[in-house]
Every structure is written in structure tokens, then in C-alpha cells.
Image: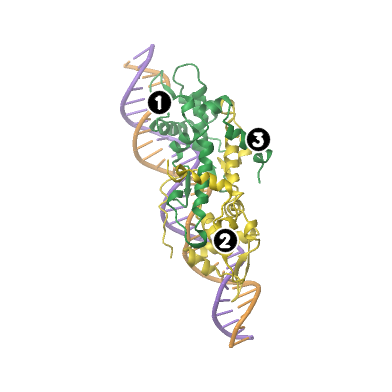
Chain colours: A yellow, B green, C orange, D purple
DNA sequence: CTATTCTCCACTAACTCAGTTGAGAAAGTG
DNA sequence: CACTTTCTCAACTGAGTTAGTGGAGAATAG
């Protein structure tokens, strides 16, 4: 039985989905694991408060993307298929949610605008680029250790970044 | 009758909604208008290929946000309530779609993480900050004139920004 | 008074999100 | 071998959102 935390009152433009959030949390557990043995789905689910079956769906997608590996059976479980320093957050989000950016269901580079709106596309491209400049730079190892890249430190240094506008 | 352009096949993380896209296009028309008279909804809709009634809904939200003003009647229409240089794209998106960033339905600053995931919040804050660094800097005047701020020029200078990953 | 144009409210079809259910296959244990 | 554990795969569901549509009504100009 799930707790149902999300009121989800409002729509918004960047939405980190439950899938992406859960995926990151599970992967971070795998990243810090030192047993050298596969970690069970059940353990990942309970220590991070994620519904087990939903997490299993997510882990399957991460396996298809080559981010985790798994084995069935009594000694089975999941582990990272690559080094934590070689998995970026962009990799994870793309694996579970698809492309980082869409404009009305289209990739930013395929949009076209007429007249006064002509330069809109360039802004959407910039939006995607700025997102990439964060998510493609930070790896599981970074987040697990708390030693985040310069870009992140700089963006979060301003107290304004921490308040709603 | 609407054309129904969007296949909407995939989900994604930044999704610029039809509403936000249409809002920007309509506002850009208002920004370049030089007649000094109100512009009719019908004209905005047909020159940008937007369903009229849907656009009217959007314009009402933009009016409630103080971005456009309007008048009914034969000489009625819409116009910008502020100077084009004083309306940012973040203003527009917030007016029609709500907050720029959510994590599982929560504002980034209200999320909390345990254990290995402890530093995830800081990354989400950085994601929002990087988005703001684009959308709060570019105004209707910038897009209408094609003279985009440095941030945008820099982000879109790299040819890599223009291709899907 | 009449035509025009915005305003407000209700409605809907299609889709997505966040899960749940359940049967099955692989791996190890006794 | 049987048996248990654990992952795998496909289908299904309910709530909510997105992208609209439709129509009555109110303001404005001529």
C-alpha cells in the first residue's frame, strides 16, 4: 500500500517525475553500497520509501538503458553496471522519462516560428542547453559524496535560488 | 477546427506546453504591433495558427496576471499592459502554467532526502536556478527584436546545443 | 438598436502519471 | 529433485492534466 504523498495541485514547466526521483534515490543507494553483493529491490524500496513494484518497473528501465545490472534468485538483486562517476543525472532522467526537453510535444530543434515569434526557438534551445549544463555535469558519485561540480555550487550559492518566486 | 499537430508520443522533463507556446506567440505579436489600437483575438489566432477559443482562455489568464489588457466591443481587442521590455518569459510561463519547477509535485525547496540521497535537493535547486537564469533574463522585447541576452547567445553558440542527444 | 468583441462557465476526449496485480522465469539451497 | 527467493514482463487502473470546444452574456462603438 502506498502512502500517496503528492497533492500535485499545480502543473509546471520542469517537472521532475516520481520515476526520475525514485530512480536517482535507488541508484544513489547502489552507488554507496560496499558489500560487493547485489542489493535487493526490497531493500532499496524500504530504505527510501518507494513502492516496491513501481521501483521494479523503474529498475527494469534502468537495466535496459545499461545503467544497472541485475540477477534473479536468492542471492539476486541489483547493482550499478557502470562506475558511479560515469552515470550522469541526464542519463538517468533520459532512461526513465525520455528526452530532457519538449515544446508542445516536439523536440526544440524541430519547432518553427513565423513572424514576430521567429526567435522563440533559440530561447527553447537555450533552455534545454542550460538544463543540460547542469544534468550532464553531475554524476551519481558527485551526489553520493556531496562534492557537487562547480556549476551546481555556483547556481545554489545565491540564497535567492532557494526561495519560490 | 484544430489541426491537431501534436503526436505527444513521449513524456519529458522540460515540457513547454501548448499554452505557454501560444501565449508567447500572441504576446510577441502584441509587442511588435504599432497601430496603437487594440489587436483582435481573431487576428492573433489566425496569424499564428492558434485555435481562437483556446487562445481566448490563455489571454484571460494573461490579463489576470497583469500582462495584457483588453477591451470589448467593435473597437476592442488586446494590448500589452506593460512595456515589452518589462515582461520576461518566466512571467508568461508562470501566468499560464504555474511555478517553473516541481519535483514529484513539490516545490524543490520543500523536498527532503535521507541517507545517500541527501544532496539531491541541491541539484534540483540548481536545475531551477539554471532555468530561471534563462527565462527571467529574456523579455518580449528581446525575442521580438532578435537581440537576445548574452546568456542565450552563449548557450546557443555551441552547435551541440542544437542537436538531440 | 445592432454588430462586434471580449468574458465566464461548463464540458469533453485523449492522454499521462503513479502506481497495482499477477503469472512466470532464473538462481541458489537442501 | 523440490522449494524458496528474487527479478521479469505484460496488462490493467484511477486520478488528474492537457488541449481544446460551446454557448450564453456583458461591454463597447457606431
Secondary structure beneath dot 3 equals helix
Mark 2 neighbour density, 10 Å: few (under 14) some (14–19) many (20 or more)? many
Q: Label 1: chain?
A: B
Q: Which of marks 1 and 2 is in front?
A: 2
Distance from the alpha carbon under mark 3 to that under mark 2: 34 Å
Tell me: residue B5, above or below residue A9. above
Q: Which of marks 1 and 3 is in front?
A: 3
Tell me: residue B75, above or below residue B108. above
Q: On the image, numbered disc 1 is attached to which residue?
A: B69
Q: Is residue B41 visible?
A: yes
Q: Label 3: chain?
A: B
Rendered image: mark on residue B157: 3
Left or right, B165 with reference to A44: right
Mark 3 neighbour density, 10 Å: few (under 14) some (14–19) many (20 or more)? few
Q: On the image, numbered disc 2 is attached to which residue?
A: A27
Q: How many labels does the image show?
A: 3
Secondary structure beneath dot 2 equals helix
Q: Label 2: chain?
A: A
Q: Is residue B16 visible?
A: no
Distance from the alpha carbon under mark 1 to that under mark 2: 50 Å
Position of the C terminus of chain A, as image quadrant, is: top left
Amino acid at each position: 500500500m502506498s502512502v500517496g504523498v503528492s497533492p500535485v495541485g499545480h502543473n509546471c514547466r520542469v517537472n521532475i517525475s516520481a520515476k526520475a526521483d525514485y530512480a536517482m534515490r535507488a541508484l544513489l543507494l547502489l552507488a554507496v553500497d560496499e558489500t560487493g553483493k547485489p542489493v535487493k529491490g526490497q531493500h532499496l524500496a524500504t530504505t527510501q520509501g518507494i513502492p516496491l513494484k513501481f521501483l521494479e518497473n523503474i529498475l527494469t528501465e534502468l537495466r535496459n538503458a545499461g545503467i544497472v545490472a541485475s540477477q534473479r534468485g536468492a542471492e539476486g538483486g541489483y547493482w550499478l553496471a557502470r562506475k558511479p562517476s560515469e552515470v550522469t543525472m541526464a542519463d538517468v532522467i533520459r532512461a526513465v522519462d525520455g528526452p530532457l526537453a519538449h515544446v508542445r510535444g516536439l523536440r526544440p530543434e524541430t519547432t518553427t516560428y513565423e513572424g514576430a515569434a521567429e526567435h522563440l526557438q533559440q530561447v527553447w534551445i537555450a533552455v534545454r542547453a542550460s538544463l543540460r549544463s547542469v544534468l550532464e555535469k553531475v554524476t551519481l558519485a558527485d551526489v553520493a559524496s556531496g562534492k557537487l561540480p562547480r556549476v551546481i555550487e555556483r547556481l545554489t550559492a545565491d540564497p535567492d535560488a532557494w526561495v519560490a518566486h
